[in-house]
Amino acid sequence: MKKVIAIGGVPATGKTTLMRRVIDEFGPLSALEEKVDGVKLPMLVDQERKLHILGVYNPEEMFAGTDRLSMSIQPTAVKFVESTEGVVLFEGDRLFNISFLETCEKLADLSIICLDVDPEMVEQRHTDRADSQSEKFKKGRQTKVDNVKARFGGGLFDDGCVESMLNNTIEQQDKVVARLKDLVYGNR
């Protein structure tokens, strides 16, 4: 079964940190640049288990994942999801939007994990990493996440495909990793 798992959240909720841990625990993974209509789509792959983690994860870069990809990567990612089998997993702002997620929902079994962190901790993380993200940018990302939750969260007759999970502590992160393992390996 084809599956897409998206991890989202506002800046500083720990999406990239979580994904680095997932990469360590799900490994070994091979770096690959899949060419889709001549455009390179970087990813980490486990061919045996048909797992594709989209994005670039260099240890020395703070902002990694799909945030390292071109702003125009969405059509390439759509074609990749159409043509691949197995699981496509990604985090980050670049592909975490209603348009891409609606397309994925038509092509595959879609699961969305939204990371939630206490506001004080989010602000501390921004301070600790000394980022220069403006308040306007941060507010825009909050609106984007809220819109995804509203669109995919379900309603009266639909459970939806969004799960909100806390990511304040290592113990909470353990639960997110366990849930991702279940989504990737348990529900095929």
Image: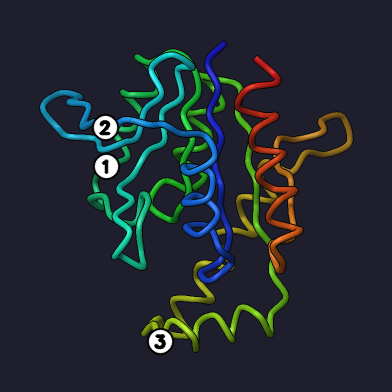
User: Who's the residue at 68% across and 51% down the image?
Assistant: 149
Residue 15 higher or lower than 100, as above or below: below
Structural crowding at the residue carrying mark 3, measured as other residues with C-alpha within 10 Å and reported as few (<14), some (14–19) or many (≥20): few
Q: Quadrant of residue 160?
A: top right
Give yes or no for contact between labels 1 and 2 (Cβ–Cβ under 8 Å). Answer: yes
Q: Which mark is residue 130?
A: 3
**Which element is circle 3 on?**
loop
Percent position of residue 143, x then y: 58, 66
117 is higher (above) or lower (below) than 77:
below
Q: Which residue is mark 2?
A: 76
Characterize the local packing of mark 1: few (<14), some (14-19) or many (20 or more) Cα atoms within 10 angstroms.
Answer: some
The location of residue 81, given as percent across then percent down, is 40, 23
Name the spot of residue 83 as percent of width and height, x first: 34, 14
Q: What kind of element bears circle 2?
A: helix
Q: Residue furthest right?
A: 156
Give amino acid for label 2.
Thr
150 left or right of 68?
Answer: right
Name the residue beneath numbered marker 1.
Answer: 73
Q: Element type at marker 1?
A: loop
